[in-house]
Amino acid sequence: MEIEIRDLRKAYPGGVVALKGLTLTIPPGIFGLLGPNGSGKTTLMRILSGLLEPTSGQARVAGYDVRTERARVREVLGYMPQDFGFYPNLTAYETLDYFALLCHMDDARARRARVEEMLSLVNLSDYADRRVSAFSGGMKQRLGIAQALLNDPKVLIMDEPTSGLDPEERIRLRSLLAELAGERIVILSTHIVSDVAMTAERLAILHQGNLLFSGDVEELLAPLRGKTWIIDIAEEELSEVRERFFVTGVFRSATGMQVRVVAEKMEHPAGYAADPTVDDAYVFAMKHDGNQGETS
């Protein structure tokens, strides 16, 4: 089971091209999809879920064509969109019960058990009878995760799932995704690099509708090994360091600033070697148009 995307293109009225001939294979496990806002991530998710028609190209989800077999795709897929609209006057329980009916869960007893199981999974059991209009953004996010899991999907697509979650909820979600993966495909689409770095086995980076990288985390990091450094400086030196080096991150320290840079060699007296991170590689990919990694 996998997702196969071949030469996928999506052009919107007005000339905006969101996807520019994307070719990508997504295997079982947690797959991270990284990219800034406007990179084409949400367009791709909506095409894979059958909500949007591609302009050209092909995409198959678990063997089903997203154009001609949409009903079969929806049977195996759970989708949590970035922006979802719940009926505000329904309670959390009523909301999931409604979505369960849309998933053809007609047995009332089995449906109730599944809804209660999902509420517990996302830590909303105590709020089952509260109206959604009274929910915080994070609670609505958790409810969105629950609805995506109702039909026990073989393919789970989550578009910015940690948006609005506090640190504890984000950790809980990461653990949940790890438990859910197994033989299932879980696509985690986000602009938060740390979410992908801590959960995904493989990832892709999109930028302006193009694929910059596809592979596992080690493939992404490999070109930066031996070329990543930390420089400890005073704050007033930052401008000079930016002029001399490719900077991937700046952090405050007890003595001033720590600057992470990528360079062939270190020519600053306060610089020392560091292991590359996914953040370093992501920033490098954005700047260098993806020339440091393989694509597929």
Image (cartoon, rainbow, N blue to C red):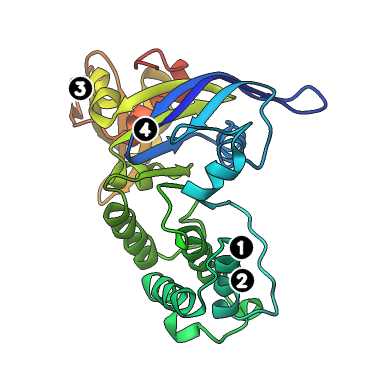
**Disc 1 versus disc 3: distance between alpha carbons?**
50 Å
Cβ atoms at labels 2 and 4 below 8 Å apart: no
Q: Quadrant of the C terminus?
A: top left
Q: Nearer the viewer, mark 3 or mark 2?
A: 2
Question: Splitting the image into 4 quarters, where does residue 11 fall?
Answer: top right
Q: Earlier in the sequence, mark 1 or mark 4?
A: 1
Q: CA distance from mark 3 to mark 2?
A: 51 Å
Q: Secondary structure at mark 4?
A: strand
Q: Residue 103, located in which quarter of the rendered image? A: bottom right
Residue at image coords 31%, 22% = 262
Q: Which residue is mark 4?
A: 203
Instruction: Give the mark toward the camera: 1 or 4.
Output: 1
Q: Where is mark 3, residue-wise?
A: 225
* Residue type indicated by callout 2: Tyr
Could you tell me if the residues under marks 2 and 1 are in contact, i.e. CB atoms within 8 Å?
Answer: yes
Q: Which residue lies at the image location 59% right of the left edge and 38% below the top edge?
A: 37
Q: CA distance from mark 2 to mark 1?
A: 6 Å
Q: Residue furthest front?
A: 107
- Residue 98: mark: 2
Residue 102 has which mark? Answer: 1
Q: Amino acid at mark 4?
A: Leu
